[in-house]
Image: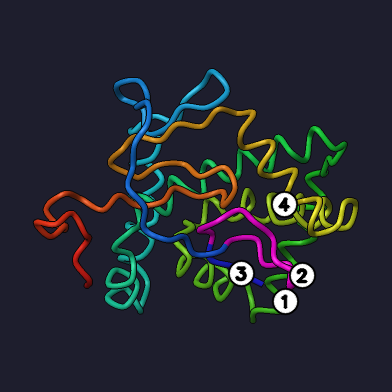
Amino acid sequence: MIRRHTALSVSAASALLLSAPLLTACGEAPRPGAAAVMDGGRITVSELQGQVKAVQEAQRHDPRAAQMVAGSGRLNQDTLIRMIQFRVIERAGKDNGISLTRREIQRARSAAEGQSGGATALRALYLQQGIAPGGIDEAVRMDLTRNALLRKLGTSKVNQVFARTSKALDIKVNPRYGKWDNTQGTAVLAREAWLRTSGGTPEQA
């Protein structure tokens, strides 16, 4: 199953990523040129833009390009969230003894292709979620890691592990993309000042 990656918590139904509310961004900003910093390293703006460009290029060559582009208004933020989440999942898996072989990843991808109607159909499904063809193997690996953690620890414990791992990585997001929430495992959007009323209450959309 292809899931939209927007939050890190796992529900009882094994959904990895949930939608996040709008909150005001604050806190320490990452270093210049960084979209996010974590664990002493960083995700650069150029890295983020490279992934976004790959998605946009693939979307332009898809028959449903107009529909995809119309639904990708938050592509920059969603892509950054996914990049961070993948690193959290990877670290959590490593800390809990989860390792995967290339063969396991390819076998899982082949199974997904069979279930979705072929390789082309699977690429289209991932592209709808903002994942370029070149990023499918990584997405499959993260999903397998998540599922392995679920089997080993259970849903409630996995949520705790993700939150603890996220906090340990000391994630800070460039304010233009929001503020990282360790509990939800996502970057929550900022409500800009010009969207507030004179009394300080955000206007309703």
Choose mark 1 or mark 3, whichever is in front: 3
- CA distance separating discs 4 and 3: 20 Å
Residue 16 position in % (x across, y down): 65, 61
Can residue 6 be found in the magenta stretch?
yes
Answer with left or right where residue 42 lies relative to residue 139: left
Q: Residue at x 49, y 58 (%)?
A: 131
- CA distance separating discs 1 and 2: 5 Å
Q: Is residue 59 above or below residue 97?
A: below
Choose mark 4 or mark 2, whichever is in front: 4
Q: Nearer the viewer, residue 202 or 21?
A: 202
Q: Residue at x 33, y 71 (%)?
A: 71
Q: Amino acid at mark 3?
A: Ile
User: Magenta residues?
Assistant: 5-17
- CA distance separating discs 1 and 3: 14 Å
Label 2 residue SS? helix
Q: Residue at x 58, y 23 (%)?
A: 39
| Residue at the spot of label 1 | 114
Of marks 1 and 3, which one's residue comes earlier in the chain? 3
Choose mark 4 or mark 3, whichever is in front: 4
Residue 9 position in % (x across, y down): 64, 56
Q: Amino acid at mark 1?
A: Gly
Q: Which mark is residue 111?
A: 2
Crowdedness near tag 1: few (<14), some (14–19) or many (≥20) residues, C-alpha within 10 Å: few
Q: Amino acid at mark 2?
A: Ala
The answer to whether the residue labelled 1 contacts the one labelled 2, judged by CB atoms less than 8 Å apart, is yes
Q: Is residue 116 above or below residue 73?
A: below
